[in-house]
Image (cartoon, helix red, strand yellow):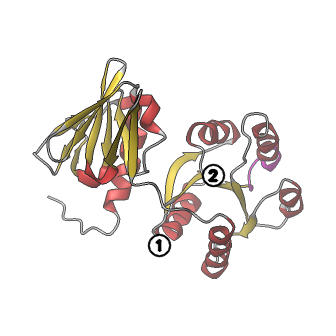
Amino acid sequence: MEYTYAIIDSDATSNLQLQHYLDEYGDFSCTAMARNDDEGLNAILKFSPDVVFINLNEKARSFFRMIMELHQYVEQIPLLIGISKTTDYAYEAIKNSFFDYWLLPYNEFDIRKSLLRLKKRMPKEAEPQTICLKSYSDFQYLNTDDILYLQADNNATEFIMKDGSVTSAFKTLKTFENQLPRNFVRIHQSYIVNTNYISRINYGKSICALRSGQQQLPFSKSYKQNIDGLKKLLSKNTISALN
C-alpha cells in the first residue's frame, strides 16, 4: 500500500527534486502540489495525504499558522516534514510537532533514514481485496481485482466486472470512492476505474482505454488532476517510445 504525500513549495526546482527522490522508493504517491499556505490547506483538506512536505524558506510564519488552523478541521494531522536552507525555523517546527526537518540541498542519506523512520511509525496494512455489497439480508462479495470500473446509475452504482457481468448496488458512486483500494481512481462524475486495467490515456479525446474488451471511458476536466496523477503512476517503470 502506498503512502500519499503533498508538497507545499513555490520553488519548482526543489519540488521536482523532492519528487525524484520519493519516486525512487516506489511506495510514495504525490496527490497534490501547492504554492502557498492557502493552497496547501485546501490540498490537505481535499486529499488527506499521509505526509506533507513544506518548504519553509518563504513565509514560514504563514505555514505555521496554517498548521494551527488545520487542527480546527481534522482530527489527525498528517506527518509534517519541513524543508529549509537554514536551521532558522527548526525550533518552531519542533513546537508545531513536525516529524522531521530537512536542510537544502537534499541529502539522500538523510532522506532515506527519515522515510524509514516514517514507515516504522506509520506502517501500512494490506488493503482489503474484497468488497461486500449489502442489501437487507443479502450479502454479495466481490473481489476488487475482478472489477473493471464502477458506473453511476442515478442513485445506484453498477460494478462492471472483467468477465462481463454487472452487479448493482443501491448506493451512490460517492459512497464507494473512499472505500475501494487506491488503484481505483475517479475520473468522471459517473466513473471510477480500476487503474490496473488502463491501457491508454488520450488527453485529446479525454478518454481512458481499458485492456479488457477495448472499452473506453471518458474523463472530465474536473478530475484532470486525478488523471495527471494516474499518468505519472502508470509511467513508472515503463519504457517511453515517442512517435
Q: Position of residue 162 (x, y in %)?
A: 18, 47
Q: Is residue 131 magenta?
A: no
Sequence-wise first label, 1 or 2: 2
The answer to whether residue 88 is left or right of residue 83 is: right
Which residue corresponds to the image point at 74% horizontal and 56% vertical from the top-left?
Answer: 57
The answer to whether residue 145 is left or right of residue 24 is: left
The segment highlighted magenta reads 56-61
> What is the number of the mark on residue 176?
none
Q: Position of residue 111 (x, y in %)?
A: 63, 74
> What is the number of the mark on residue 9?
2
- The secondary structure type at the circle numbered 1 is loop
Question: Of helix, strand and loop, which mostly describes the magenta segment?
Answer: loop
Q: Position of residue 127 (x, y in %)?
A: 47, 56
The answer to whether residue 195 is left or right of residue 3 is: left
Residue annotated with mark 1: 24
Q: Is residue 57 magenta?
A: yes
Q: Nearer the viewer, residue 138 or 128?
A: 138
